[in-house]
Amino acid sequence: MKEQQNFLRRIISSSTSVSNERQVAQLEAFIKKYRKDTTKLDVFGQQLEESRTAKLWRDRNLKTLSEWFRKQNMKSV
């Protein structure tokens, strides 16, 4: 039984992995629509939280990282 739960958790985790704002909104809508079922599995909430955190990190750091990579690229030319 434990193996099945871990397998289900991995399936849900990989299928709910999101990388942009639109996908986060879709995941939120899915969780809300199927609240009765998704509340039984904490993996949905975990994935949503991880997705939000990743998006916030990207929003805060993308410009800085882009500038750093550009400068590094200029040095090597």
Image: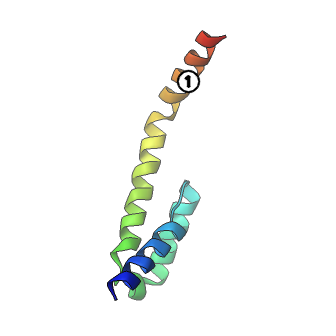
- Does 20 sit above or below residue 59? below
Between 14 and 38, the one nearer to me in the picture:
14
Q: Position of residue 8 (x, y in %)?
A: 44, 80
For the N terminus, the image quarter is bottom left
- Residue type at tag 1: Phe
| Image point (39%, 88%), residue name | 36
Q: Where is mark 1, residue-wise?
A: 69
| Image point (32%, 83%), residue name | 2
| Image point (56%, 16%), residue name | 71
Describe the element under mark 1 as helix, strand or loop: helix
Q: Position of residue 13 (x, y in %)?
A: 46, 69
In the picture provided, is 15 more to the left or to the right than 36? right
Between 54 and 8, the one nearer to me in the picture:
8
| Image point (56%, 24%), residue name | 69
Q: Label 1: how many residues lie within 10 Å, few (<14), some (14-19) or many (20+)? A: few
Q: Position of residue 11 (x, y in %)?
A: 49, 74
Q: Position of residue 57 (x, y in %)?
A: 42, 43
- Does 39 sit above or below residue 57? below
In the picture provided, is 19 more to the left or to the right than 57? right
Furthest toward the right, the residue is 77
